[in-house]
Image (cartoon, rainbow, N blue to C red):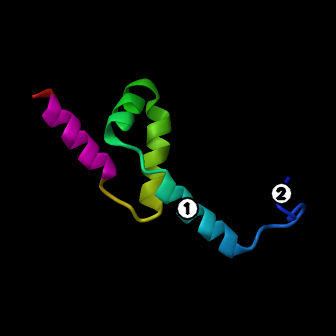
């Protein structure tokens, strides 16, 4: 179940590595984010906040600018 850490916390190196892996694999294409924004805005908000907490800023702003310019 828990990779041998049942009842214990995993080593911090495992936590850091897995969060870095998640960030690199969790890069969502802008057209998918647009669909998420229309259908599931709360999930997209979690994506933005997760990136901001890990030091990746500007995705939300870039998305909004792209979506606004595509409407014109």
**Residue at the spot of label 2:** 2
**Image spot of residue 14 (x, y percent):** 68, 70
Along the line of sight, which residue is nearer the eye, 17 or 12? 17
Dot 2 crowding, Cα within 10 Å, few <14, some 14–19, many 20+:
few
Percent across and percent down for residue 40 are 47, 29
Q: Which residues are magenta?
A: 59-70
At 16% from the left and 32% from the top, the residue drawn is 70
Are discs 1 and 2 less than 8 Å apart at CB?
Answer: no
Determine the residue positioned at 22% across, 35% down. Answer: 67
Looking at the magenta stretch, what is its main secondary structure?
A: helix
Q: Is residue 13 above or below residue 36?
A: below
In space, the residues marked 1 and 2 are separated at their CA atoms by 18 Å
Label 2: state its secondary structure.
loop
Asked whether, in this view, residue 19 is left or right of residue 42, the answer is right
Image location (x, y in percent) of residue 37: 38, 31
Is residue 42 found inside the magenta-colored segment of the image? no
Residue 56: quadrant of the picture: bottom left
Tell me what residue is drawn at x 54 percent, y 65 percent: 20
Callout 1 secondary element: helix
User: Furthest residue to the right?
Assistant: 7
Which one is nearer the viewer's eye here, 48 or 30? Answer: 30
**Residue at which label 1 appears:** 21
Most extreme residue toward the left, as rendered? 72
**Left or right of 22 on screen, residue 6:** right
Nearer the N terminus, badge 1 or badge 2?
Answer: 2
> Which residue is the extreme one toward the top?
39
């Amino acid at each position: 179940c828990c990779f041998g850490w049942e009842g214990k916390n995993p080593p911090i190196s495992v936590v850091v590595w897995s969060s870095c892996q998640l960030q690199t694999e969790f890069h969502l294409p802008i057209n998918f984010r647009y669909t998420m924004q229309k259908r599931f805005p709360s999930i997209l908000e979690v994506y933005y906040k997760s990136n901001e907490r890990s030091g990746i800023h500007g995705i939300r702003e870039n998305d909004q600018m792209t979506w606004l310019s595509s409407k014109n």
